[in-house]
Image (cartoon, grey):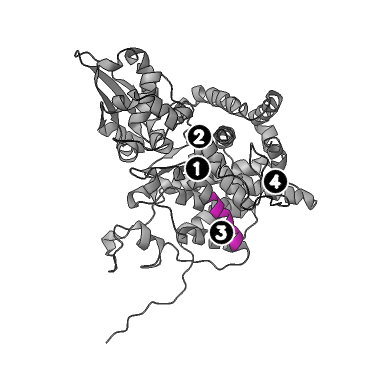
Amino acid sequence: MSATYDLNERPDYDDVLQKIADYVLTFTVQSPEALDTARNCLMDTLGCGLLALRFPECTKHLGPIVEGTTVPHGARVPGTSFRLDPVKAAWDIGCIVRWLDYNDTWLAAEWGHPSDNLGSILAVADHLSQKRVASGELPLTMRDVLEAMIMAHEIQGVLALENSFNRVGLDHVVLVKVASTAVTAKLMGASREQMLSALSHAWVDGQSLRTYRHAPNAGSRKSWAAGDATSRAVRLVDIAMRGEMGIPGALTAPQWGFYDVLFSKTNKDQALKPEDKQRFSLPQDFGSYVMENILFKISFPAEFHAQTAAEAAVTLHPQVKDRLDDIDKIVITTHESAIRIISKVGKLANAADRDHCLQYMTAVPLIFGTLTAEQYEDGFHAANPVIDVIRDKMEVIEDERYTREYLESDKRSIANAIQVFFKDGSSTDKVAVEYPIGHRRRRKNGIPLLEDKFRTHLATRFPAQQCDRIFELCKSQSLLEGTPVHRFVDMLVI
């Protein structure tokens, strides 16, 4: 009679964990394009965070857990007077930069927003820079921040290329937590063993379900989920650097590891069959590919799968604005990911529900010729019942070419087309937009608009002279890279 037992031989750290750690500890950023794009990403991310401070539903989350807390060398939250411990500062910064869903995006088998990692990066870098200066050491510079951003983008983006977390119901912020854990561990001076320990705990942590992004539960948690992930990353690094042991088989442990519990096709009590087991695919080495190819949301504060739909709708606005009552149907031709993630019919419960609804994000610019953050709010929606009338006339269909080219590495299009049909049998042209203005293929046209967007967002928080100083510094690659982090953040506080 054979005994049943678990073989208690502690393994080496999982290969994926080791690849991430070795990349962060040894990679040297040499790509001028990646550094330039990271600088633009920094501007856009901070600008969107400043704009979010106009919304009370966002600002109610900010500040210390215990009112009046004083933190020596505390990290600052841009656009505010808060000085917080790095864990809460990461939460707050991550919250504001993601609140309006208006900056960068990465689309692949999994999608997400690698700029979310700035929450942990900037909080930790600001705190450490102040602490070093107080101890007579050299501060961290903004070059360190840009390099950390490039590596965080790369970790999150490469893991997303062929691994779909949404298909097993997990939210993409798991990748924010992992990427932030790796790069903040480096900033904090972690050894390889400490970094591996922290990474293992990031995967073992309970992971967020995507339900708060989808009908019928879509809500504002999706706007602070990234802040929560970056905050947790900083906490896990702190735990690991206090000497906490790691969990080497966090991903691969039979029955109890991440793969078998959360990533495989079944999660039943019986042993998984070989064909049910799923493992991460890493189709390419870590480098600077993701930052070089990142997508910017320049024109619209809208979920990225709808960016080109909104652009097409603005183009059609002059042809339909005076014929809204004559519309028979509207056909939106799109890609499979958009249908799965943001196509919704029926009542929309809140702003977070609306900014993840393809039909809403198409209807508003068709009717008004614009799509702004304020147009998702309850008051605007209630005052304009025509929006839901137009939504009800929409038909969403898939174009297989759009779906295919969405995933092709040399294209990565995010295509949508719109055609409006009228009751008299006439119709508009079918307006198709395959690459949004924030795509790498449209960088030349997009970056000046991104800079204008940054200046506009700065002006929502700071006087003109201060806006000019911040903008001029951010425009200069060399001056920005050489600026101490704490001096840079000094310019961003109230």
Q: Earlier in the sequence, mark 1 or mark 3?
A: 1
C-alpha span from label 4 to label 3: 21 Å
> Could you tell me the amino acid type at mark 2?
Asn
Q: Earlier in the sequence, mark 2 or mark 4?
A: 2
Q: Nearer the viewer, mark 4 or mark 3?
A: 3
Vertical side of 453 occupied by 198: above or below = below
C-alpha span from label 2 to label 3: 27 Å
Quarter of image, res 273: bottom left
Q: Which residue is mark 3?
A: 236
Q: Earlier in the sequence, mark 4 or mark 3?
A: 4
Quarter of image, res 386: top left
Q: Secondary structure at mark 2?
A: loop
> Could you tell me the amino acid type at mark 4?
Leu
C-alpha span from label 1 to label 4: 21 Å
Residue 59, horizontal then vertical, whole percent: 57, 40
How many residues crowd mark 4 within 10 Å: few (<14), some (14–19), many (20+)? Answer: many
How many residues crowd mark 2 within 10 Å: few (<14), some (14–19), many (20+)? Answer: many
Seen from the viewer's position, the closer of residues 302 and 57 is: 57
Q: Residue at x 59, y 40 (%)?
A: 30
Seen from the viewer's position, the closer of residues 191 and 458 is: 458
Q: Which residue is mark 4?
A: 140
Q: Which residue is mark 1?
A: 114
Q: Nearer the viewer, mark 1 or mark 2?
A: 2
C-alpha span from label 1 to label 2: 10 Å
Vertical side of 245 occupied by 459: above or below = above
C-alpha span from label 2 to label 4: 25 Å
Please tell me whether the stretch drawn in magenta is mainly helix, strand or loop: helix
Residue 65, horizontal then vertical, whole percent: 61, 52
Q: Residue at x 42, y 61 (%)?
A: 251
Q: Which residue is mark 2?
A: 103
Magenta-span inclusion, residue 118:
no
In this orientation, does residue 309 appear?
no
